[in-house]
Amino acid sequence: NAGVTQTPKFQVLKTGQSMTLQCAQDMNHEYMSWYRQDPGMGLRLIHYSVGAGITDQGEVPNGYNVSRSTTEDFPLRLLSAAPSQTSVYFCASSLLETDTQYFGPGTRLTVL
Amino acid sequence: AQKVTQAQTEISVVEKEDVTLDCVYETRDTTYYLFWYKQPPSGELVFLIRRNSFDEQNEISGRYSWNFQKSTSSFNFTITASQVVDSAVYFCALGSNDYKLSFGAGTTVTVRA
């Protein structure tokens, strides 16, 4: 199993550009989520999904969209990047809602 | 609302010293789950330990041990005989039945040779 994979590892955007951060897992996990990590603030939940076709907002959803068309994939879309979205983004998954979440390697995004 | 507080921002020790990381949490849920994750300089998040609210038994796993006390809402984590490879940021996290995890701000541990 590859576990949770994320692409790209690094990305630089200009303000206003759009992009999609990819996340995939091969463990048949129902639950997937996106977090952002900023210095001194730990990780904050952006969006999460409890299964294919079901998504919901987390703590900091503004500026981000998600969809879950398959169990394996959970992409995060930035529609119009802003400097405030400069962060490290982590995707996580777990089998059940109360299970331990396992994280991908992260994507470091810089918005100029 | 759930909240996790890690009051220690940074801890620096010499190799072989013990390190205890403090974590205090707030929740209204009667069933909840507590975690410790490690983030080494390479950046990935590594799951270390998990404790369920209905199980207050404290355990030791190798050089790791934890002290879960519901009465004080604390979930402290100890590394015994620290090593340089233990240098990392350690996060305490709180989850409940809604799948969402709330993280503390993290404690940076530096172990000097």
Image: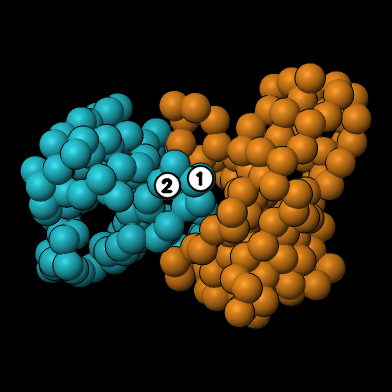
Q: Whole-percent x and y of residue A25? A: 67, 70
Image point 51% across, 51% down: which residue?
Answer: B44
Q: Is A26 on the left-hand or right-hand side of B72? A: right
Which SS class for mark 1? loop
- For mark 1, what is the residue? B43
Query: Which chain is drawn using orange?
Result: A
Q: Is A71 on the left-hand or right-hand side of A59? A: right
Which SS class for mark 2? strand
The quarter holding residue B103 reads top left
What hue does chain B carry in this figure? cyan
Image point 84% across, 68% down: which residue?
Answer: A69
Above or below: residue B11 compared with residue B33: above
The quarter holding residue B62 reads bottom left
Q: Is B53 on the left-hand or right-hand side of A2? A: left
Q: Is residue A67 visible?
A: yes
Q: Is residue B28 visible?
A: no
- For mark 2, what is the residue? B39
